[in-house]
Amino acid sequence: MREMLAPMQMHSNATEAELIELRLNDSFSEDNPFLKSLQEWIVYPPYFKLKMFLIPPIICLLAAILVIPFILFVIFSHVNIRQETRYLLLGNALVSDLMYLLLYTMSAVFSMSTFNPSKSGCIMLLFLLAMTYCGGLLTSAAMVLDTYLAILWPLHYISILTYSRAKKMILFLWICSGIFPGIVFLILHITQDSGECPVENCSVPIILAMTLQGNDAMKFCYILSVSALFICLSLILCGYMVLYFKTKQSGIWRSIFSRASVTFIMHHIILFFHFSPLLAVVVESLLYANAVIGPQTGIWVSMIVCNVLITLPKALLPYLCGLRYREISTSLKFCIKRKRSTVVAPTTFT
């Protein structure tokens, strides 16, 4: 029975591939080498190599799941901790990063499987990915502003950032995180023809690689997004540098192993990993625009950027920054010791 079903299944898969290829032939122009390479990628994807790229986001997601829920539990279960703005912002950043890792891993699995969501479901998934990414980035900028106010204006800090204002600020960050991707998606929805993008899976790397092949509206959205990310990251970097020069005379930077120096280095490591995918995308775009690299190389670079460079800092944030807070690390150690002490030894009867 299996021997009879195997040829039928192979014929069914071949027929499906032929139908996809025929449909894509009607959509793609053979004059464009990028679209022709993309056609070959969609019809005959290198599944083994693609599955290797599933490993980094899955590892990052597991690493985040191991520690983020415990940090969030410590923040929201202690009244004195959750009423501080810095911990609320940290919790918001961790929630955004965890949601992004979960959504991106889902999209990566969908793009490499036979199950693909509908067009509306794919658009919603991409919108949530953009929203959670912007949410984490804007929260990082808000954390720098919070640190700036706490260090340079300590007497007015409590009156400026109260608990109620901190909650309103987090709500405002989520609204802003949805507005910018919403504007970009609205522009693309109005200007793009449904026949121009025949890719029906939610492969973020392929969509990223296709942006330079779109019309002027798509290129404008691409440049706008890259510029906005670069400005936001530059403002975060400037905030850290201003903090360093403002506190240079205080003596907290004398030793490279001091707590302030180590925390400063940890934040810059995270910031470097945020800058690296942006720089990789810009360099890849310039190389492809000048015909230095081919379309296949561009797709592989997009795979590295999306699956490795973007997901890595989101997995490192709770370890390098979240556990650096004394209150959180102390509470976690106390919970672990308390859990161990609750183990009841076997009772002996005399």
Image: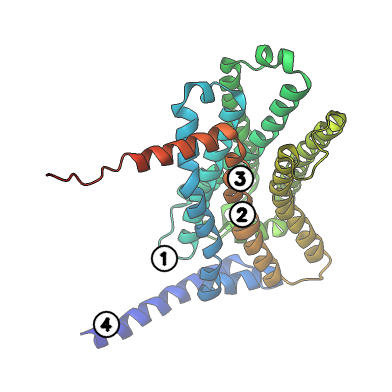
Q: CA distance from mark 2 to mark 1?
A: 27 Å
Q: Residue at x 74, y 58 (%)?
A: 280
User: Does residue 249 appear anywhere in the picture?
Assistant: yes
Q: Answer with mark 4 or mark 1, whichever residue precedes in sequence.
A: 4
Q: Answer with mark 4 or mark 3, whichever residue precedes in sequence.
A: 4
Q: From the top left corner, tell me how far across and down residue 333 is, in percent.
A: 48, 39
Q: Residue at x 56, y 53 (%)?
A: 194
Q: Is residue 223 shown above or below 29?
A: above
Q: Which residue is mark 1?
A: 114
Q: Answer with mark 3 or mark 2, whichever residue precedes in sequence.
A: 2
Q: From the top left corner, tell me how far across and down residue 79 is, in percent.
A: 48, 21
Residue 305 appears left or right of 121: right
Please tell me how crowded label 2 is: few (under 14), some (14-19), or many (20+) other residues with Cα within 10 Å: many
Label 2 sits on a secondary structure element that is: helix
In which quadrant of the rendered view does residue 140 lie?
A: top right
Q: Is residue 148 shown above or below 234?
A: above
Give 260 or 275, whichever is nearer the viewer.
Answer: 260
Which of the two discs, 2 and 4, sits closer to the camera?
A: 2
Going by the numbered disc 4, the residue's amino acid type is Leu
